[in-house]
Image (spheres, rainbow, N blue to C red):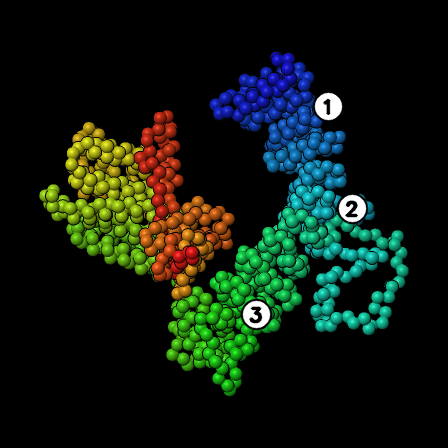
Amino acid sequence: QENDASVRLKIASLLGLLSKTAGFSPDCIMDDAINTLQNEKSHQVLAQLLDTLLVIGTKLTENPSVRMRLVEVACKHLTDSSHGVRNKCLQLIGCLGPVEKGGAKEAESQAAKDVQKIIGDHFNDQDPRVRTAAIKAMLQLHERGLKLQQAIYGQACKLLADDYEQVRSAAVQLIWVLSQLYPESIVPIPSSNEEIRLVDDAFGKICHMVSDGSWVVRVQAAKLLGSMQQVSSHFLEQTLDKKLMSDLRRKRTAHERAKELYSSGEFSSGRKWGDDAPKEEIDTGAVNLIESGACGAFVHGLEDEMYEVRIAAVEALCMLAQSSPSFAEKCLDFLVDMFNDEIEEVRLQSIHTMRKISNNITLREDQLDTVLAVLEDSSRDIREALHELLCCTNVSTKEGIHLALVELLKNLTKYPTDRESIWKCLKFLGSRHPTLVLPLVPELLSTHPFFDTPEPDMDDPAYIAVLVLIFNAAKSCPTMPALFSDHTFRHYAYLRDSLSHLVPPLRLPGRKLVSSPVSPSVTPHEDPSQQFLHQSLERVYKLQHLDPQGIQELLEFTIRDLQRLGELQSELAGVADFTATYLQCQLLLIKALQEKLWNVAAPLYLKQNALASAAAKQILEETYKMEFMYSGVEGRQVVIIHHMRLQAKALQLIVTARTTRGVEPLFGMCEKFLQEVDSFQRCFISELPHMQGSFVDKLLDLMPRLVTSKPSEVVKILQTTLRQSTFLHLPLPEQLHRASAHIIEPTGESDNPLRFTSGLVVALDVDATLEHVQDPQGTVKVQVLYPDGQAQIIHPKPADFRNPGPGRHRLITQVYLSHTAWTEPCQIEVRLLLAYNSNRSKAAAKIAKSTWSESLEALPQPESGIEGTIPFSKPVKVYIMPKPARR
């Protein structure tokens, strides 16, 4: 009831915030708010009150009477003179208007029609903000499941010519929605008496918006074109054809002229008489051009001044070309042209697009020329994307293959770091075009019918590239090996062993080097290996009660078998390694708890203590590996990992108790351990029934006794419990992958040391592939170990990670090295580490929840975020030499 409007405004907005808070029941203030609306004079306060009502309405969605009442209030205020109030009313109707389906009463369906009519009437409001709000309210109704009527299509089309960009932008969206709802309806063409499908008409209208004045509208129109898959093909093809009119006669585009020159093989010399003489007169009045909307929409989009519009156009082309092979062929020229765009992002997007549609197309030589010119690009991402594209393109002639090879070799000399990528590209080029490579073989290997030619150098990456191309083509072309000279066979044997992922097994005639015929590949779900895995584990679980010696031997054999299985079958590697690690922990625990070690008198068991504490430490490390290095670990495995960790901590406690004098330090340790048992119980309460007879199960039974006992008692109880507890059955998850990394650069083969002045830095390029790493930006670190024991850990920037495919990442970064002067060169080690933090695990999230809900003063967290790193790549040695600075 304040006099000042601004105070009332704040109160109204406060009510809205109040309604959002949980546990506040908004029914009570609704009536008051509606009553206040009747007497309010200030427009701003009115708008704010309506906003509060909107919040209340969204909270009480189940109650139809409340909704109807609020919609009525909104309709009443739609005649307000202020645009802000009308805006809010439309928003309220859009969010709360009735959208009931079929079974509802006539009145309700009538109401639904009315809602659309009320909103539709505001499409031609005088204020552009209200017009925008009306269209958005319509779209809101559509999102809530109300089927919009086709009648509003005409109104929406008129709005495309609005003066304000936000109105046009919303109208484009509305037209797109209607074209998806009624694609096959027929609408008349205004200028003539013909009719046309609604989706085609909408497509033409949205195409027209690609040349709108505002770039925001252009981007939106271009994006929406891509999702209109039901358009007729002649409309689609029209978008690429900017029919250039001169006296209303069609001129040929530059592409067509180039294509004709290419096919005729000669350029016009100007000798033909009357080449460009004027044709007969045309009566300009008699020619009726079609609605010029679709004409050349993509041409406009791809030539737009704003790079966002160009990217959107390229993406739309990609989506449409994937669903229509004939369109894919036609848009090829335009896509190839985009490879020369001045913005890197556009070039990259067009290369990716081309790769996605490459199954439907074959490149002509002139197009291949343009594509290969991009290999000069200084950006590594673009070159690698282009290599990927060449892997899956079809080339039409042997000259094309030769041209591609020459350009790739030029790229190799200019950028030697692209080596792996280029070899892989040539592997696919060879295997896709064996018949085109065959006639080039004598030239590529520079053989001669009756002279011996010198043997090329095996260490030359360019020669290896040529061989990779030829050997992959030879796989499906049995006549090719007859053209090889003797040294080629020797080189084949060498490459087959050193680069087996690039060189396929070949059957070579009459040579001793015949590689064994390829065994039929085992399908991943064929049972033998899976069966073997399960049987090995069953055997271990069944024979738990053997004498300790027998159990140890059995575990050692099983661990060895599982590790071999992981090496042989890549599909099972994750599961096999995971179970082997678990059994390894179990084995360490059994060894550390052997009877005879613990029966020795106190002063004599230094050696045993060392063994037990080392075992406990190693088990802890292995459990962190199991929890953080594998993706796909489920809750049931997490429990068992944590249980194993608890046993290791109990072992640590026992060892410490036997080696420390005095009782004081033990009190704290016992209390900490009991807290951990407690938090384990709270965290995994649902899993405890599955853990009968386990260490934790027995401890929890003894808990009341433990809490009141002295430390020495506690340690004794722990020791006997550890001995008697059975070990738990580890359920195998469906899909388990071990995180792994392979460092490509530096290769670690060079004998030339990297020389630099001591005290200054030298940059070392690191390029690595990462498999199955979750959130690499946060967890992957690079470690450098110097010969004097110093270690550096470097955090790569988020931009250094690329994501080429699901589960795969690529790290390309620079590491700066520096050191004081050395007398002679030495090797440093570079490796990748996976950082973990036990607070980020699933278990910690559970603990946090449960402690919060039980008591507000949360118990001190047992593991106060243990952080660490796990090495997960083979180290690479790099030779460096810091020289003393010259005086």
Relative height, residue 12 to residue 595 (above, below): above
**Disc 2 secondary structure class:** loop
Give the distance between the C-alpha atoms of the residues marked 3 and 1, in whole angstroms: 73 Å
- Above or below 617: residue 75: above
Question: Which image quadrant for residue 81?
Answer: top right
Is disc 1 surrounded by few (<14), some (14 to 19) or many (20+) residues within 10 Å?
Answer: few
Residue that appears at 72% across and 65% down: 258
Nearer mark to the viewer, of 3 and 1: 3
Quarter placement of the C terminus: bottom left
> In the rendered structure, are the residues bearing label 2 and label 3 in contact, judged by CB atoms less than 8 Å apart?
no
Residue 309 spot, x, y in % from top left: 66, 48
Q: Amino acid at mark 3?
A: Val
Q: Assess disc 2: are there few (<14), some (14-19) or many (≥20) residues with their C-alpha within 10 Å of its C-alpha.
A: some
Mark 2 or mark 1, which is nearer the start of the sequence?
Answer: 1
Residue 214 horizontal side relative to residue 513, left or right: right
Residue receiving disc 3: 406
- Residue 224, x across and y down, in percent: 65, 46
Q: Which of 540 and 366 lies nearest the eye of the viewer?
A: 366
Residue 827 percent location from the top left of the image: 36, 59
